[in-house]
Structure formats: structure tokens, C-alpha cells
Amino acid sequence: MNCIIAQSGGPTTVINSSVYGVIKENFDLNLYENVYGGVNGIEGILAKKIINLSSIDQNKLEIFKNSPSSGLGSCRYKLKDFSENEEEYKKLISILREYKISTFFYVGGNDSMDTIAKLSTYAIAKDINIKFIGIPKTIDNDLKYIDHTPGFGSAAKFISTSVLETYLDSKVYSNNGIFILESMGRDTGWLAAAASLAKIKGTSCVDLIYLPESSFSLDKFIKDVQKVYNEKHSVYIVASEGLKNKDGEFLSATKSETHDNFGHSQLGGVGSILKAVILKANITKRVKVLELGVLQRCSMHCASETDLHEAELVGRYALKNSMNCTNGLMVSIKRISNLPYKSEPIFIEANKVANNIKYFPTEWINEEGNGVTEEALAYLTPLVEDLDSTNTLPIYESFAI
């Protein structure tokens, strides 16, 4: 029998490491005759865009492992419930049987786990002997029942490193103005919170951090900025793209009129909105904005070794246990300790993960709603580290600050 693996949703820096883990573990254990790859996710499999990964040259596999973005392509394809449209399910099962597939691995986030939950439910209901197993990924770190998602650690390292470097750039003048960095994060503030890791000489580079989990007030924002500017003649701000007001409306509502197949708003532009507010308040005319955009999910040059390792590990764990596990599971990561950092892969039901969101804990947001606590730093720090090392972020020196 054979297995197949595909990728879905937004890419991450380390998503290919999970595919590599499945392939390499099968080389070691020889559980399946072939590991096939579905190009462009379930949408591609339905179009029979399928390749044999077991025949790929080993050198190419090693390069693939350390390549960013989804090396098998991706999709945002929403399966309807089989009670509404069973034809897609029948077509998919027919294709999987044609390739003698007994296990389907899907690497993705919340929506991908929805797909795994639906397919496994269908397989059980129709007594189909094919297993559907989820392998987690998302830079947003918003999957429930998992300590952290593969992809988040590398994004967190890139964001915090970018803060370090742009902070130094923003501090070269005696009157430095205001710098705003916008991170991804439609629903949660995990990525923006990662900026808190950036420190120079033991002092945080970021003055103000704003997350979607705390309702955003423009009046309070102006007071925060004015206070810091009066004290330091400079302000470094990090804002999540998903900031919402007290009514739950996106601050960048004018940017969120388009949606993907799962109904998610396409955001961006919060930094420019905040700049306009600051200029209108006449705090200073020196305001710069940096939107990190897709660099957060594809910067392999800044990947976390821990993240790369765990991404491969969840792939290996999925393959190793696929013969003996029940249908409809997702590999999760359980944190055992922070110091020293230890974790282990475990299984969780995919239907528990699907259509749920893990929010940044409100108790990890400071009382002012413009920063994070030491508990957040303790959680974040190990995820950007090199393996077996305390070397987390670059160490820089400046004699001007």
C-alpha cells in the first residue's frame, strides 16, 4: 500500500520539513511502498496532480527540506459536508484507491484540520479503509490543543530580529520620531507579541505592542504614544494587522472587503492607519511604517532550528504511528519544560482543532493593553532558539544609545 501527503493554506518557512519527515521516516521504516505528493493540496489531488516523492533524489530532498514556502504547492479549497455534496468525496476516494493509498496526510492549519475531520468522518461512515491524518502548521500559532505550531517559531524569530535591526536603524538621530511595524495576525496576536523578544543591552526595543485580543482605542493609543514620545523623543510601535475596536470591528475595515474560500477577511494596512492618526494628532511629522508581509512566513535565512526540528518531528511521528492510530487525528506538540526546553509529539482529534481559535492569553497582556508580560516571554523564548543553545537572537552593539 501507499500513502500521500499534501499541503494546504498559507505557507511557512518550515512546512517542507514536515513533508521531509514523512518521506524520511518511511525510508527508515518502509511502512509504505511509495509516498506520493499531491500538488496544490486536495484541489490538486482531485485533478490528479500527483507525484512520487519516494523516487526523488536524496540531495534534492535535503534541499527541499531547507526551502521555504509550500514545495508541493497549496490551496484554499473548502470541502462541503458530504451530506451536501458527496460527489467530491466519491471522486477523491476513487483517485486514492487508484493509487492504492491507505493513508492521507494533510499539512495545514485550522481549515485543513476541518478537511481532515470531514474526510475521516466520511471514511468511518462509509466503512472506507483509508486513514486521514493532520500534520499542523501555521505561523499564526492559533491552533487549539497544541502548545505551538510548526512555522510560528521561525516567524517569531524573523519578527524579533527585524525589530532589533529596524530599531537600531530608527535610533540614529537625536530626534528619531516614531516607527511602526505591522505584523500578520488576523485573529490573534502571537506574531506581534514575538516582538517583545527583541532587546538591546537588556532593554526592550519595543515601547508599545497592540494585539487583537485587547480592544483597541484610538484615543488611548494617542495618549500612549504621546506619553512615550514626551519621555524619549522616539517611539517604537508594533501592531497586529487584526486590531479591533470595542465593537469587534477591524481597524483596517476598508481593507477587509475581500474574503478567501473559508470566509476570512484579507487584512493589511493597520500601520498606515496608525500613522495617519499620529500625524493628525500632531505628535511629530517623523513617522515611518514597515509592513513585514509575507516575509514573516518565508524567511528561511532566519529560521529557528527548534522549529525546523519540530516540523520534521511531527511528520515523522505521523508516519511512524499511522498504521496503529485511529482515523481523523492531528499530530500535536506538548511542552514538557521551558528550561531546559523539552517537547514531545502526541495525537489529538482533528475535529477538536477544526473551526477553533487559540487566542493569545489575555493574562499575558499588561494592564495598559500595550505590552506583554514575563510569562509571555518565557513561553516565546525557547521557540526561537537554536537547538541545545541559548543563542536566540543576534547580539548587536551601538554606542549611540
Image: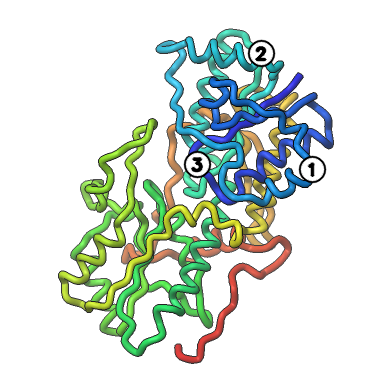
Q: Is residue 101 above or below residue 221?
A: above
Q: Is residue 147 above or below residue 301?
A: above
- Residue 161 or residue 228, whichever sits in front: 161
| Separation (CA) of disc 2 from disc 1 | 28 Å
Q: Amino acid at mark 3?
A: Leu
Residue 383 picture location, percent across and down: 60, 58
Disc 2: which residue: 97
Q: Amino acid at mark 1?
A: Gln
Q: Amino acid at mark 2?
A: Arg
Comparing labels 3 and 1, the label whose residue is closer to the camera: 1
Mark 2 or mark 1: name the one nearer the start of the chain. 1
- Residue 337 or residue 320, whichever sits in front: 320
Q: Residues within 10 Å of mark 1 (few under 14, many from 20)?
A: few
Comparing labels 2 and 1, the label whose residue is closer to the camera: 1
Residue 337 picture location, percent across and down: 65, 56
Mark 3 or mark 1: name the one nearer the start of the chain. 1
Disc 3: which residue: 143
Residue that lies at the very extreme toward the top in this rendered image? 126
Residue at x 37% of width, y 57% of height: 240
**Would you say residue 235 is visible in this rendering?**
yes
Q: Residues within 10 Å of mark 3 (few under 14, many from 20)?
A: many
Residue 163 picture location, percent across and down: 46, 69
Examine the image and state in which quarter residue 261 appears: top left
Residue at x 44% of width, y 60% of height: 193
Residue at x 51% of width, y 32% of height: 112
| Separation (CA) of disc 2 from disc 3 | 31 Å
Callout 2 touching callout 1 (CB < 8 Å): no
